Image (tube, rainbow, N blue to C red):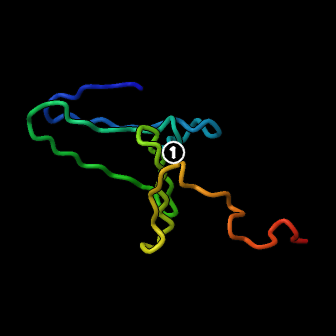
Amino acid sequence: MESKQLTEVEADGCPVRSQRRPDRTRHQGPTGAHKIMNRSEALARTLMFSSSRVPAVSVYPDSNKIGVWPGNDADDLVFRRETAVPWSHGEDEWDQAS
């Protein structure tokens, strides 16, 4: 993982060039992942902006979790990968559909 130390009142972005459209910048997928940490004893303030919309999915590889935000608060989920079930779980006779 690439790391960058910022000095006081410094800003940084996490843009990634799109593979399909090199003229566009995007922040999606593992190559656009980012993490902000304060390794000092001093107070750190962080302000983030995003143009992303719902639905949204985030993968947290350090904690082996996935977050899903479909745009309805009641259906927002964050779960560990090992608790996932196949999409067919609980779908009676899904394999017999014509």
Which residue is the site of mark 1?
28
Q: Dot 1, crowdedness within 10 Å: few (<14), some or many (≥20)?
A: some
- Quadrant that contains the N terminus: top left
Q: Residue at x 72, y 71 (%)?
A: 91
Residue 15, given in percent of the width and then of the height, sits at: 43, 38
- Label 1 sits on a secondary structure element that is loop
Relative side of 47 to 73, left or right:
left
Residue 2, given in percent of the width and then of the height, sits at: 39, 25
Q: Residue at x 87, y 71 (%)?
A: 97
Residue type at tag 1: Gln
Residue 52, given in percent of the width and then of the height, sits at: 45, 56
Task: Return the residue nearer the eye: 26 or 29.
Answer: 29
Task: Return the residue nearer the eye: 70 or 49.
Answer: 70
Relative side of 9 to 78, left or right:
left
Residue reaching furthest to the left = 42
Q: Residue at x 91, y 71 (%)?
A: 98
Q: In the rendered view, would you say 47 is above or below 56?
A: above
Residue 66, given in percent of the width and then of the height, sits at: 49, 51
